[in-house]
Amino acid sequence: MRRWPPWAMVFLVVQILVPSWQLTQPRPARFGWQMYAAGARASEFAVVGRDGKVTTVALEEYIVRRRDDLDLLRYLPPAICARTGAAAVRYRAAASLASVEIPCRR
């Protein structure tokens, strides 16, 4: 019977141990088996116009597929500001009642 080469055994062990260890980390964990298995948490974005009027943003206009590993709070407000000419973008996480207002650059 032929033995596996040592590099193949190490590769196989790493492929099992790393995702197994990531199961103990907060989810979604990078390189974990659950990385894309969890559904994205719903969050809300709204545009605050220059006149103070608040309008809810349809995220489908900006995001094709929602994923938990995307940092929406980092990338989406500048895109919304540039597209709408808003004064600010209001963000509310799914599990939170409080909202965060991010001012737009002029």
Image: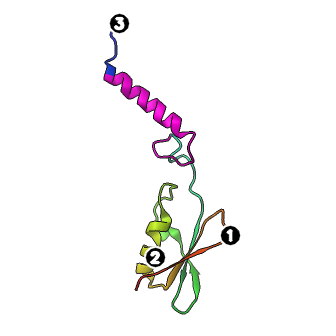
Magenta segment: does it hold 16? Answer: yes
Dot 3 falls on a residue whose secondary structure is: loop
Q: Quadrant of residue 1?
A: top left
Vertically, is 5 above or below 91?
Answer: above
Residue 13, image x and y in percent?
Answer: 43, 26
Residue 97's tag is: 1
Frontmost of labels 3 and 1 is: 1
Task: Judge by depth and name the residue closer to the eye, 3 or 100.
Answer: 100
Secondary structure under badge 2? Answer: helix
Residue ID at (37%, 22%):
9
Q: Is 3 placed above or below 53 here?
A: above
Identify the residue under disc 3: 1
Q: Is residue 71 visible?
A: yes
Q: Looking at the image, is 24 positioned above or below residue 17?
A: below
Would you name the residue on which mark 2 appears? 80
Tag 1, which secondary structure? loop
Give percent across and percent down for residue 42.
Answer: 60, 62
Question: Which residue is at the far right?
Answer: 97
Q: Earlier in the sequence, mark 2 or mark 3?
A: 3
- C-alpha gap between disc 3 and disc 1: 63 Å
Task: Name the kind of residue labelled 1 in the image.
Answer: Leu
Q: Is residue 24 magenta?
A: yes
- In whole angstroms, how far apart are the C-alphas of marks 2 and 1? 22 Å
Quick one: label 1, few (<14), some, or many (20+) residues within 10 Å?
A: few
Kindly tell me whether residue 62 is visible in this rendering: no
Residue 11, image x, y percentages: 37, 28
- Amino acid under label 3? Met
Q: Residue at x 66, y 62 (%)?
A: 95
Give the residues in magenta. 7-32
Position of 68 relative to 9 (above/below): below
